[in-house]
Structures are given as C-alpha cells and as structure tokens.
Amino acid sequence: MKTREQRTANKSIADSGLDLVSMRSGSLFGFCSARRISFSIYCLIYLFNKCRQQYRSDVQRIPPPSAILVRCAQPSDPPRMDESKSIEQLENDYWPSTDFPTPLVEKCYRYRKIPVQDLSIEQIRLLLGQKIGVRHLLNKAIKVLKEDILSEGDFFPGDLLISVLRLENSDWKGNAQLQTEFNKLLELKKSEIIAGDDKDILRQIEGYKNSLRTT
C-alpha cells in the first residue's frame, strides 16, 4: 500500500499535469483567436484596397465637364431630306405661274417642281448656279461627283464641280458633314482633276481652298 507521503506526491504531480494541460489549452485558444483576428483584418484591408481601385477606375472613365460641354455644343448636320420631294415641296414655297421674262427663269420654275432624286446633272448644275434649293441639292450633287468628279452638264466636263466650288461659305452652313465629304473627295480625285487639264477648274479649287483658310 502507498504511504500517505506517496499519495500526496502523486496528487501534486497530477495537479501539475492538469495545470500544464490548462496552460497549453489556453495558449492554443489564444493563438487561434489571434490568427482569426489577423485573417479578418487582412480580409478587410484587401476589400478596402479593391474598392479603392474600383472607385479610381470609375472616376477615370467619367469625362471632365469641359469634354461633356464640347460634345454637347458641337453642331450636328440636319437630317437628310426626302429626295422623293421637289425643292418647292421641301421649302414649302410655291412660285406662281406667270409670264417668264427669260428662258432661264422658266427653267428654274420647272426644275423646282421635279423630285430631287430625278434631277439631271444639268438641272442640278443650273439650280446651284442660281443659288436655288442649295441645301437640298448638295447631297445629290456630291453623290454624282463621287461617281465622276468631272460630271458634265450641258457645257463641259467638270461644270457641275465648278458650280459646287463657286458656292459661298454661307451656302454650306448647316451642312458641315457634307462639306467635309466634299473636301475629302477633292483630295481623293485630285489626280483625275489634274489629268483633265482644265485650268479654270484648278483655279476654282484654289479659290475654294483659300476661302476655307480665311474662315
């Protein structure tokens, strides 16, 4: 049998063992808690940085107010007209029938009644030359010139081109896109125009370009 001293010693050893286990358990719990807290903080920092990066990206995509104002203020061309209508229908301006003083006036009267899409090269040339229905004819005239820059009416190759070149800057007002198309067309067809060797056309082109520089 164990003596009283042995039992006391064994109990002390057992109590020491329990204390050691408790200490280790407490340390382990504290260690795990610390790791969970650290991981949570890491997640919060990561999410914060991602949100900040997304915010900066969104801000960069927003145009500055000045860019928005310029975009809003930029003039746009009017919608293309219905070319199945005549000039007098598009302008809602009907000339009365009367005794015409000259054949030219009579022609202008008759041509204003023809649907724009059905006008011949000569009819377009004459109407542009008389500054009649210009804004309704520019689109049609440029279509014709794209097919043949030296399209011919009743006079000579390139007479339609000359009629367009002689238009005033004010005649292009509200048709900026068409004028840009026409300017590009002149450059695109430059070799064909030079090959035509018409000095009058070349002078008209130079005069037209000079008028663009002064505006």
Image (cartoon, rainbow, N blue to C red):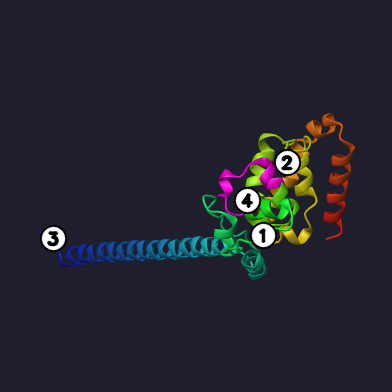
Where residue 201 sits: x, y (%)? 84, 40
The quadrant the N terminus occupies is bottom left
What secondary structure is the stretch in magenta mostly built from?
helix
Q: Quadrant of residue 214?
A: bottom right
Horizontal placement of 135 versus 20: left or right? right
Give, as a three-letter code, the residue at label 2. Leu
Q: Amino acid at mark 3?
A: Lys
Is disc 4 in contact with disc 1, using a CB cutoff of under 8 Å? no
The residue pinned by badge 1 equals 99
- Residue beneath label 2, please? 185
User: Of discs 3 and 4, which sits in the foreground?
Assistant: 4
Tell me the distance, in whole angstroms, between the alpha carbons under discs 3 and 4: 136 Å
- SS label for mark 3: loop
Residue 111's label in the rendered image is: 4
Q: Which amino acid does the dot numbered 4 rest on? A: Tyr
User: Residue reaching furthest left?
Assistant: 1
Measured as percent of width and height from the top left, residue 209 is found at 84, 50
Q: Which residues are magenta?
A: 110-125
